[in-house]
Amino acid sequence: EGEAVCVDDVKMVEIPRLDFSVEEGQFVAWIDVADEDIPPAVKAEKTNKFRAGFKSGADRLFGAISPLQQSVMKQVKNISQSVQQNALFEDFQNKATMVRQAATSAALPVLKGALSRDSSPVRDPRPRDWCMHMYTCPDKYVIFPPTSPPPALNSPPRLAIVVDRKAIEVTCVSVEEAEVLSRGKAKIEIMGVLGIASLQHAKYLVVVTGRKLVGEIAGAGALYKVTATEQRVLGDRKGLGGENPIQMSNRAIEERLLSDQMETYSLYFSHQWDVTHTQQRLLQRPGGPAGMDYAGREERFVWNHRLLEPFAAAHATGCVLPVVCGFARVLPIAGLKREACMALIGRRDWHRSGYRYLSRGIDKDGNVSNAVETEQLVFVPTGAAEAAAAAAAAVAEVVAVAAASAVEGAAGGTAQAAEAPLIDLSEGEPPGASSSSSSSPAA
């Protein structure tokens, strides 16, 4: 069937049919060469005729098998080339799995004895707030802003976002115009847009479809963790290779790797306040800690900064979610005279993030490898007038109790707290605690 050189395309090679007929002249009845009644000349003639017919049939059989063998070898070669081309993506997937397992094994021992005592999940009192809807049209995606809670009276009107699937362009339209575009189309519920990821074989629209409430920050708002994401392929069908099996396989591998990558990281966001800044920096700006100002984000902590560039260029930031990568936890504190909570938030800098053995040192702009900003908050969920005084008193009491515990630990050993639903800072040794024989003071 000709040369089947397959690099980017798959060529179907037709397997020839093994069909050949036996002519009458080639059919020779079996003769007993030991029969003495047959003359020697007749024996020799029949034997030669039988051998010639057998050789002719074998040659025709091998001639039919040879193209079959060549076509099978070509198919094996195509499969081998496809596996070699996709081996790079498999390596990425193995590395992502390795990083996830290493990070989990390294973090569990620390978190188990420190902040993982409260294993009960935090219940979201407003599960429907800030939910959005994305409609899938033949040539575009239409994303509506949240309707709950309702916007303030003096706030500007909320706009919908339209993402062109072929041209990969982002525009803003009014909600009324978006309703006309999306009428009768399929929709899904999302929490926000993470951006557009540009990979080797296609571009993907990444949206958040699941969240979990971490806790409430007094004076700011709710803090959420990303629990589920989805991807949608963007681009012209012809430009993406159409129904080419190899291109479809590459896109499927990329989409799976992108999904695994999103599950590897711990991403946090808030609809009500800027999680990329500390509360101290937010209190120093005119709007205070509450409010969403996309232009005022701390760019080095916006983990999806590159993915949001098309939306920022089109000023379509109403439905996007700038997220931080790291750690966040809000826990109540027991043993004080008043109710108080502690929040711990860690933000990773994306400029020089990477494997510990690949990314080291500092660059010319002053960015160090795997830099993390850690923020610790102690707050009292009371009224706004009493918040400052109560928080200061709670901090002073926490410091005093910690200092007393450190002195006792230096004298009698390090106390290790057992599993408990709260962080207990009361006087004395917690129930179930065990004393260690180490001579190092308690920190």
Image (cartoon, rainbow, N blue to C red):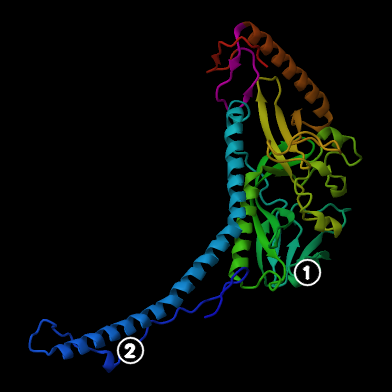
User: Quarter of the image containing the C terminus?
Assistant: top right
Residue type, numbered disc 2: Ser
Residue 412 placed where, x, y %? 60, 7
Q: Residue furthest bottom?
A: 24
Q: Secondary structure at mark 2?
A: loop
The residue that appears at 33% across and 89% down in the rendered structure is 21
Q: Position of residue 232 (x, y in %)?
A: 67, 62
Q: Is residue 148 visible?
A: yes
At 63% from the left edge and 45% from the top edge, which residue is drawn? 264
State the extent of the magenta-drawn residues as a range: 412-428
In the depicted structure, whether residue 376 falls above or below residue 91: above
Which one is nearer the viewer's eye here, 47 or 208? 47
Nearer to me, 246 or 221: 246
Main SS type for the magenta part?
A: loop
Note whether 20 is above or below 94 in the view shown.
below
Mark 1 = which residue?
Answer: 167
Residue 222 lies in quadrant: top right
Q: Is residue 317 visible?
A: no
